Image: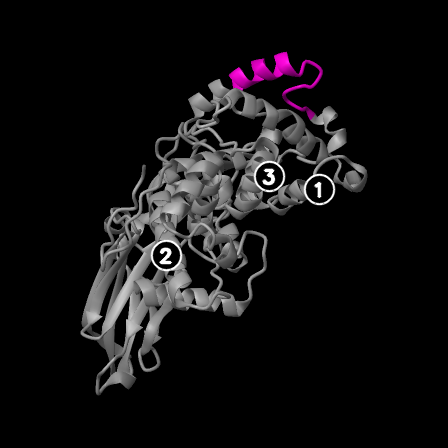
Amino acid sequence: SSSPGPRGQAGYPAAFFSVDLAAAARRLLAFLRSESARGNAGPRSVRRYEEMWLPLAADAAGGGGEEAAMLVPPPDVHLVWLCHCFHHESYVAYCASRFGRLIDRPSILDAENEEHAADCCRDIWAARYPLEPFDLDSSEFDGNNSNGIENDSANSEIFMMVQTYAGLADHFASPFVSEGVYHVAARRRYTCFLDLIRKGVCTTREDTRLVPSLDILLMWLAHQSFPASYATDMTLMSIKDSVMKMVVSYGEVASEETVERTRILWEEAYDEPYDLSGSEVDAAAVGTAREAFHWQAAASEEDTNRLYKGLQPRFLMEVCVFLKGEFDSEHISKEFLRLRAQRCYRSLKLDKSVSNLSCKNWQKMWHMYCEFATRGLTIEVRRSMGGCFRNSKILKNISFSWNDMLHEKSLMLTEELDARIMVMASITPPIQAPYLLKCVPDRVTDDGGAMISDVILRMRSYRPQEGRWLTRTVLDYGGKECFVVRMRYCSESICI
């Protein structure tokens, strides 16, 4: 079992799950991102799931069915099975009406055991269904065309479930979602979310609905992917009949009022913002910014530049800074907040006036993407001194270190800026980003690599000369010299 651990500030609700949610989320993401899961799961896959796989799984589990058979179905069937499990109430009712008991998924949480279970299932499948291939290749997907579902014997309800989750892999495309520390933080918030449902059953109206954020949705789906464990845990928390009524499911459109209501209830219950870094409700709101950094391309493959030891990889993270409280000062019109990086980027100065920042609820002040090499950020309270140079002096400052935040299970820290002002910073796990290189001019050299005199260069107006080499030094994002490029100007071409 897994526990989210105690709350660092005021005691988060404790809960024990009958499945390791962090490992379950890791395996779910690995399957969704695999090439086999991105195939065409259509009517034929649904028929294979209903007519072949479920009877095989029921027989392999035995008459009692207390424990699931350690078998992994074909990829297309596996995808259909997962989508069916994501609709927990429908799946439980389906299994009860057809088999008289729940057909559970096996708790296989590592790649080696999963591969072994798939090989065992392949042998059993071949013996039981000799005319039906275990793995469908591209030429055998003709029966998966969704255009003819009206005239097909496949279950249209299950097929629509599969269609609903067609874009699930893209929904979790951000590379930091695969990090273990992200799963630990998500498990804690998922526990709070379930506790919020339990409180809602007792204290709010029955029509109150909650919208899960990205991390909570991941934990919820990973939990539902093991039906027996999910049913047991929901029963112990006394919310078995309330989850589907109160939670907005994936693919369902939530109104702005519902989203805002979720934020308010969360902040009232736990005194922290609902939309933290990597925990957004609206993925489209941050999708454009994340695509601009090319995170997927950089983090999805291994470092291809290991050959060049001088190249140092860079890591990016998403950072959100929140503020709560009221400023009380007689010079409030002259005071402002300044955000700076602890290391590098000394010219970075993000200022905000404090005259209109007083708020009773958490307010997002900055949402940005930082390099891990900056080590952290500093927030200063400054007062303008006037004058033609626009000088200001520091009244107080607080700092947030990336390393300190990564050691927190919640990936966030709260500091007191003033007696009545609190500041909270939240981050995502650092993810390798594309290399950032800069080419700067260097001295002109001769064929032997010796520098050419400035006097000669001035005489020739600094123009490239035949037989002379133009030199360019390549720097990385930290200003470190990586390598040198020398080009020789010839009459017909440029030689490198």
Q: Residue at x 30, y 71 (%)?
A: 324
Mark 2 to mark 3 CA distance (whole Å): 44 Å
Residue 473 can be seen, yes or no: no
Asked if residue 149 is positioned above or below residue 316 in the image, the reply reads above
- Residue 421 circle label: none
For this view, does 138 lie left or right of residue 276?
Answer: right
Give percent across and percent down for residue 332: 26, 84
- Residue 156 circle label: 1
Report helix, strand or loop for mark 1: helix
Report helix, strand or loop for mark 2: strand
Q: Give the labeled residue for mark 2.
A: 319
Q: Nearer the viewer, mark 2 or mark 1?
A: 1
Asked if residue 431 is positioned above or below residue 9 in the image, the reply reads above
Q: Residue at x 57, y 13 (%)?
A: 123
Magenta span includes 424: no
Q: First in sequence, mark 2 or 3: give its number.
A: 3
Q: First in sequence, mark 1 or 3: give its number.
A: 3
For this view, does 181 lie left or right of residue 331?
Answer: right
